[in-house]
Image (cartoon, grey):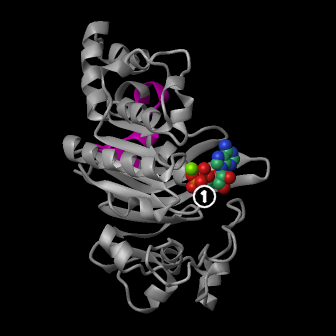
């Protein structure tokens, strides 16, 4: 059984302007121990997808349709009490975008980390402390951090605490939403190395969300590219990075600066569409250099172009990809 299976998920925000179709018919699967990277420009629905996977979508958003199977159980149909009791932190934990700046300022690191152990596992303070020390070590910190407050920590140290929190109840899946975006480049690299160690040590599934494709190149086994609420390309890291098929993925990859390359960095002209009234047909067609008539009329299906590599583009459909 897959660790996670998302089928035709739709999560919309109901605003005065109309429904914002932030996640619109997304399907994906993740096996135990696998790392999935999800990349796409800001506003394409990455965070909304992540929130949906822990059953928490901020209002006025909600899951409208689809299934989210975790160990075969559909969490899209669970109520808040069941999600809290059975799923969140225990099976799936999340490192929210900007979480390191949301640590409670008046609690010590020990207090912040002890709470889930005491509440969910019934640990005593002493038992919790022992577990926390182990975990601090696992994220590259020592006992001296127990009594410190968030403001006494550097950005990288705060992010290590947030990662420790996500791991504390040993979930099967950790979702990290832009976990390095607020950090400088050197610390970013250190935190990515920590994630790689965590992956090896705990053999957990991870979903890594970023607007910067280069971040996930080293850690992800599988990669999903999102555009305007949809997954437009999905495959192994090698397939997506070495053999990108969707014009949008190709554009994203060209926009990554490469050391020693003489090629000029290019960016895809135009901006992502309004998700209240997205363009008909392929949502990327207004920005696509290869747009054909059919792209303005019909939504391209996600087709398999090689085993495990899926692309939603009429150029591919024309070349005979399989459904
Ligand atoms: N609370 C909200 N109310 C209305 N629209 C929202 C809300 N949160 C996000 N959106 C919209 O949903 C879309 C996806 O947003 P988000 O999931 O945050 O994207 P990303 O994480 O890829 O930047 C965007 O168009 C955004 O404006
Ligand atoms: Mg986001």
- Between 171 and 62, the one lying in front of the other is 171
Q: Residues within 10 Å of mark 1 (few under 14, many from 20)?
A: some
- State the residue at coordinates (46%, 46%): 179
- Between 79 and 166, the one lying in front of the other is 166
Percent x, y for residue 76?
Answer: 45, 42
Q: Is 132 displayed left or right of 55 in the figure?
A: left
Q: Is 112 displayed left or right of 168 in the figure?
A: right
102 in the magenta segment: no
Q: For disc 1, does the CB lie below 8 Å from ligand 1?
A: yes
The residue that label 1 is drawn on is: 42
The C terminus sits in image quarter: bottom left
Query: In the picture shown, does residue 48 fall above or below 214?
Result: above
- State the residue at coordinates (27%, 43%): 198
Percent x, y for residue 105?
Answer: 56, 20
- Kind of element beneath mark 1: loop
- Give the magenta-colored segment's residue range: 68-83
Q: Name the outermost residue toward the right.
A: 16
Count the marks: how many? 1
72 in the magenta segment: yes
Is residue 149 among what the camera can see?
Answer: yes
Percent x, y for residue 196?
Answer: 29, 49
Where is residue 266, by image quadrant?
bottom right
């Amino acid at each position: 059984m897959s660790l996670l299976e998302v089928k035709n998920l739709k999560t919309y925000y109901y605003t005065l302007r109309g429904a914002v179709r932030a996640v619109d018919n997304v399907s994906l699967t993740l096996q135990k121990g696998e790392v999935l990277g999800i990349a796409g420009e800001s506003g394409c629905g990455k965070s909304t997808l992540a929130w949906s996977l822990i059953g928490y979508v901020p209002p006025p958003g909600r899951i409208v349709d689809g299934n989210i199977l975790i160990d075969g159980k559909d969490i899209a149909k669970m109520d808040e009490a069941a999600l809290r009791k059975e799923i969140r932190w225990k099976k799936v934990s999340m490192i929210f975008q900007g979480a390191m700046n949301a640590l409670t300022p008046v609690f010590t690191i020990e207090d912040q980390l002890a709470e889930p152990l005491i509440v969910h596992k019934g640990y005593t303070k002493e038992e919790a402390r022992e577990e926390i020390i182990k975990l601090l070590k696992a994220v590259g910190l020592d006992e001296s951090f127990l009594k410190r407050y968030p403001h006494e920590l550097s950005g990288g140290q705060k992010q290590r605490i947030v990662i420790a929190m996500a791991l504390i109840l040993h979930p099967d899946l950790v979702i990290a939403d832009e976990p390095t975006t607020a950090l400088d480049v050197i610390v970013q690299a250190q935190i990515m190395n920590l994630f790689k160690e965590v992956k090896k040590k705990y053999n957990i599934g991870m979903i890594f969300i970023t607007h910067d494709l280069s971040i996930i190149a080293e850690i992800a086994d599988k990669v999903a590219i999102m555009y305007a609420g949809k997954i437009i390309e999905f495959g192994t890291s090698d397939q997506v990075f070495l053999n990108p098929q969707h014009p949008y993925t190709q554009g994203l990859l060209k926009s990554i600066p490469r050391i020693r390359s003489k090629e000029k960095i290019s960016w895809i002209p135009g901006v992502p569409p309004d998700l209240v009234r997205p363009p008909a047909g392929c949502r990327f067609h207004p920005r696509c250099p290869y747009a054909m008539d059919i792209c303005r009329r019909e939504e391209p299906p996600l087709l398999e172009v090689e085993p495990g590599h899926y692309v939603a583009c009429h150029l591919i459909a024309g070349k005979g990809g399989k459904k």
